[in-house]
Amino acid sequence: MSTVRLTMAQALARFLSVQMTVIEGEKLPIFAGVWAIFGHGNVAGLGEALHGLRDKLPTYRAHNEQAMVHSAVAFAKANFRRRMMVATTSIGPGALNMVTAAAVAHVNRLPVLLLPGDVFANRRPDPVLQQVEDFGDATISASDCFKPVSRYFDRITRPEQLIPALHRAMTVLTDPADCGPVTLSLCQDVQAEAYDYPASLFEERVWSTERRIRPALDELSAAIAALKAAHKPLIVAGGGVLYSGATQELADFAKKHGIPVGETQAGRAVLHYDHPMAMGSIGVTGSSAANAMAEEADVVLCVGTRLQDFTTGSWTVFGNGKAKFIGLNIQSFDATKRWSQPLVCDALAGLQELSHGLKDWKSPASWTAKADKALADWKASVHSATRLANVDLPSDAQVIGAVQRGLGKSATVVCAAGGLPGELHKLWQGEVPGAYHLEYGFSCMGYEVAGGIGVKMAQPDRDVVVMVGDGSYMMMNSELATSVMMGVKIIVVLLDNRGYGCINRLQMATGGANFNNLLKDAYHEVMPAIDFAAHAAAQGAIARKVASLSELEAGLAEAKKADRSTVLVIDTDPLITTEAGGHWWDVAVPEVSVRGEVDAARAAYVQKKQAQRLV
């Protein structure tokens, strides 16, 4: 057997550089690059190895470990999981900074390879700098924190362990059902140890990420029968539709069979906003159209969704107590949720075979007529909420309208947390799949700017607009400097409502006093007055504060022509939200309180809970 003597880190880097995939007939490296912040746990071993392959496997420097993984995760999502990235850190705090972003990838079923440095396998210098010592278990290190948020975890304590670990890692990263973050924790002394690796390990390999699992015949027959018996069918479309490449199949299926479609956060814009069956968003932040159809639906076909509580209105949005659910999902864990009738298969394959079995069946004309009326009413509400208005403090909805007018409906919007995801879910009108990029599985504050970099790297020909509130921007904004440094141009619209406006509204809705959310309601010796435009300019971006919606639209037109990232700051009202649409969400209210407002909110809460489905 032919062998090559390499350090473990050199072998790892060489392996990553020859893993390929094919997208639309073009063979590409499946790993687009490595995000790295070097420290004593990875600079000597993996750092040296990456330098040797920098022309084949680019290494990108970031400013924050969590943020660089957000960029990697966003890149994978914007590529519909067909390509991905790697992230490496030192041990201890550098590694732990990645854990939150690993959870983002885990919750959202997105591939990323994480390579944190780890302690010495030989234990000679114990405790090494930044080592976490467990008094009762010497095998534990900080990297164990990755275990709950990794689809696959391995600690490499000998150089030859890398061989099976890499095979398992690639299998998970490219598997449509098990896809998610993989963590290979690299003991820092082992990174530098040499081993005679089989030369075959470094032969080019092509991985497919589009495995088409066909449905079992009995599950398919049951699903067809359930749909044919339906009088008021509804489709809930999730991110799995995008990852399967099934957007056209869904559009054709919904139109042919007359089934309205409600879209989750991950599935938003799977249909063109003008598709006749596109009811828009569903659930807590849903459109009045989709939620009205959900209220009466007797059969719900759930395609590529994990049915989280914002989608289901904490399981109150489906008002028909006898409604049946069909779980069309490649992951059986999701396909069987809430006693759904499973249809375990690829979304594209499943929709094709369902349509073939349904033949010319179509839902009743009265049902599609109801959908038409509900959709027309909703579009009027969208226009009203987003229209240009001359106001002192615009709403989030009005800013969204200005952004869409300024950039057009083919731009990709990126957002993650606060009040904006709810308004965007309702109001953003996407023309192409992938034009709506929300991280709302983990709702991770700080994702936005870093995520925008990853999206732009995946979609270099599109305008990428990051919409972010002041609270989330303050949590993680350093990658704005990275975007300038790398020449990855993004447009940031920063809505300053002077605090955590979304949680303040939730606090009020549950009977709480205004407390510790808006800056004016928190303890300060001096009230903060942050000049966000000056801060952004200090990081190298073009930046300005705009005083009106018209100025914002003009600023966006300039930003489209600019040669680097632009930040536009606008003051907004922290209390106004779009009244149309929406649904109840289960947020537990205290059972006893000295505040009458809380007691009233508790009574309303108890009443709403009676509508929750258990099965």
Image (cartoon, helix red, strand yellow):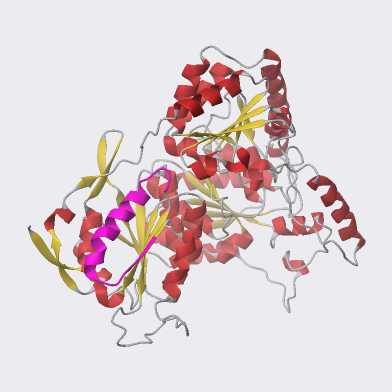
Give the left or right position of residue 367, taking residue 569 as reference: right
**Is-magenta flag for residue 12?**
no
Residue nearest the observer in this picture, 283 or 469: 283
Identify which residue is drawn at 55% across, 25% down.
222
Image quarter of residue 482: bottom left
Residue 490 in view, yes or no: yes
**Extreme front residue here?**
218
Vertical relation: 4 (above or below) 218: below
Number of marks present in the image shown? 0
Image quarter of residue 167: bottom left
The percent coordinates of residue 56 (x first, y second) are: 21, 55
**Extreme top residue here?**
360
**Is-magenta flag for residue 176?**
yes
Identify which residue is drawn at 68% across, 71% down.
528
Identify which residue is drawn at 37% across, 73% down.
90
The percent coordinates of residue 475 (x first, y second) are: 57, 65
The percent coordinates of residue 346 (x first, y second) are: 43, 34
Residue 399 in view, yes or no: no
Give the left or right position of residue 568, taking residue 105 as reference: right
Work out which quarter of the rendered image holds the C terminus and state it.
top right
Work out which quarter of the rendered image holds the N terminus and state it.
bottom left
Residue nearest the observer in this picture, 301 or 523: 301
Magenta stretch, residue numbers? 153-178
Vertical relation: 22 (above or below) 504: above
Identify which residue is drawn at 62% across, 25% down.
260
